[in-house]
Image (cartoon, grey):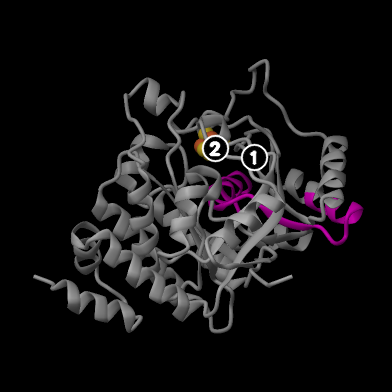
Amino acid sequence: MPVLEQLYKKALDCLPLTVEEGLFLYEQAPLEEMMFIGNRLRHIYNPGKITGWMIDRNINITNICFSQCLFCNFCRIKDSPDAYITKINEYIKKIDELYALGGDQLLLQGGMNPDLGLGFYIDLFSRLKELYPSLKLHALGPPEIVYLSKKENISYYEVLSRLIAAGLDSLPGAGAEILSDRVRRIVSPAKATSDEWLAVMREAHKLNIPTSATMMYGHLETDMERIEHLILLRKLQDERPDGHYGFITFIPWPFQDKGTPLSVKKGVRSSYNGPGYIRLIAISRIMLNNIKNIQASLLTVGKDIATLTLNAGANDLGSVMIEENVVSAAGAVNRFDAGDIQSIIKEAGFVPVRRNQKYELM
Ligand code: SF4
């Protein structure tokens, strides 16, 4: 039976905890002690008081998606009256607004639309880069890469290489949800499996494109599956070639249940609560001894809990996300501008520093 003090020491020595050790800490350690350890580690991995934030804009490429994940309120089938594919003039209008607010990073996401192949994305990225050479594209995610690979009958490496050549700057960790196929078969059966998600990220790391790792929790997964998720990320990060970016950050956020099929049809409500999120941030900081940054999801957990996470392992509050449509479609109500996010960080006793998608300070 692991003893808490021994595990605290192992964590503070930045050693990799096993599944059993991580689960024991996660379930048994008092919250204040978890926060203390998470905070000490925050200062080891990111010394000083700097807390990152950024400005970016979300544009959804299309809301047509064959996947129909049960936690998603955003997707539509092709013939829905409100189905869309964003047109180039709309991109231009939105990117002009982004530049006017001082940002140059675009988060491009959307559904897996069966009518859109690799050529569509290559044309889109090339056109945007032609119009805005300084624009940074943080776009798609492993499920889209798996989908495009199958559709075009080419490898993940080839899909990623062509997208990078067209202008992809970094790959979000979208679609990780929980890396357990038991859970994925229920909540998102048409989407990439755990192994597929990890395999895409492995190729992205070989290509040295920055990536992020995520977790969407609080639905059907067990505590053990959360810890196993963290260990799968850690193992993959260990495989990245020397000097390559790998995962530059880890971002967990809770399932937003409002109006989702998972909630309405299956009666599954989000198990989110504030102390639980702080505990998750702390255990993530402890388990992920090879990922430098831990980002709290200000958008989904709000100011009070996000502030506390900065003393529990998180060193970043993410983005002033202009036009977020996916989690907000499922009930996330928080909105912050550049002034708000900096005030929140200062009130928590830290120094807000704006960064880019690669976590380089600006
Ligand atoms: S979460 Fe993404 S992949 Fe799943 S249905 Fe929604 S848009 Fe499609």
Question: In screen coordinates, is 286 left or right of 196?
Answer: left
- Secondary element at image label 2: loop
Q: Residue at x 46, y 47 (%)?
A: 192
Q: Amino acid at mark 1?
A: Glu
Residue 82 image point, x, y percent: 68, 20
Q: Residue at x 52, y 66 (%)?
A: 315
Question: In screen coordinates, is 182 left or right of 114?
Answer: left
The quarter holding residue 245 reads: bottom right
> What are the residue bounds of the magenta stretch?
125-154
User: Which residue is disc 1 drawn over?
Assistant: 324
Q: Given contact means CB atoms under 8 Å apart, are the residues at marks 1 and 2 in contact?
A: yes
Question: In screen coordinates, is 117 left or right of 283?
Answer: right
Give the prevailing secondary structure in the magenta stretch. helix
- Secondary element at image label 1: loop
Residue 197 image point, x, y percent: 47, 55
Q: Nearer the viewer, residue 119 or 47?
A: 47
Task: Specify the farthest residue to the left.
Answer: 1
Q: Nearer the viewer, residue 19 or 48?
A: 48
User: Which residue is disc 2 drawn over?
Assistant: 327
Q: Nearer the viewer, residue 86 or 15?
A: 15
The answer to whether 77 is drawn above or below residue 8 in the figure is above
